[in-house]
Amino acid sequence: MKTTGQRWHLRNRHELNAFIEHVEQQWADKKYPTVLFMKADRSSQQNRYIYALYSDIARQTGEGIVETKRQCKLMYGIPILRGSDPAFCSWYDQNVKRLPLEVKLALMDHLPVTSEFSTEQGTEYIDTLLKEYANRGYYLIDPR
């Protein structure tokens, strides 16, 4: 089946009502929609905040944003994924763990880490970055 149509994020009553109205109109027009329920992933707000943290960390450490993102993904994101996904943990341990640090950092440009996070894992990642960089003496603003 070819994927077509729209994606709906139902985060509040207004969005739910708009979705219901849309489905009812589809039915009235004899266009019967297929609905797919998907697991919630990282929120767009979390995504924006993670990238803001990378930028803030890079500014304060004097490292580039690419280097900062790589380090954060490797040092803090990979452990979150390894802890929650036994298959990923096994793959990582067999294929990546013994590589030199420089190679692992470069691999972070190509290995999905934070994009695989659930909302809860995204929160854990943000909290970890805030804690770890505070322990190093950097002040990162937490808008929550």
Image (tube, grey):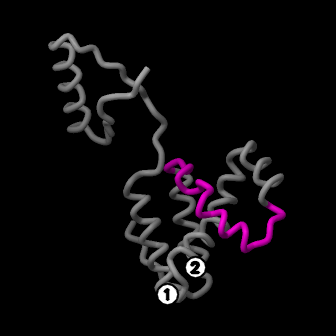
**Alpha carbons under labels 2 and 1: distance apart:** 10 Å
Crowd class of label 1 (few under 14; some 14 to 19; many from 20; radius 10 Å)? few
Horizontal side, residue 10 vs residue 108: left or right: left
**Residue type, label 1:** Gln
The disc at residue 142 is none
Is 31 rendered above or below residue 139?
Answer: above
Residue furthest out toward the top:
30
Q: Quadrant of the C terminus?
A: bottom left
Quadrant of the image for the N terminus?
Answer: top left
Q: Nearer the viewer, residue 94 or 125?
A: 94
Q: Nearer the viewer, residue 16 or 51?
A: 51
- The structure residue drawn at horizontal position 61% and vertical position 85%, both measured from the top left corner, is 136
> How crowded is the residue under tag 2: few (<14 C-alpha within 10 Å), some, or many (20+)?
some
| Residue at the image point whose x is 61% and y is 65% from the top | 73
Q: Position of residue 86 (x, y in %)?
A: 75, 44
Q: In what element is the residue under mark 1?
A: helix
Q: Amino acid at mark 2?
A: Tyr
Q: Is residue 80 magenta?
A: no
**Where is residue 68 drawn, in percent x and y?**
56, 76
- Classify residue 61 by image quadrant: bottom right
**Location of residue 89 with respect to 15 vertically, above or below:** below
Q: Horizontal placement of 12 versus 67: left or right?
A: left
Residue 96 image offset from top left, x and y in percent:
77, 59
Residue at horizontal 44 percent and vertical 67 percent from the top = 51
Residue 133 — which label? 2
Q: Nearer the viewer, residue 127 or 75?
A: 75
Q: Is residue 106 magenta?
A: yes
Q: Which residues are magenta?
A: 97-119
Instruction: Report which residue position mark 1 lands on.
Output: 60
Mark count? 2
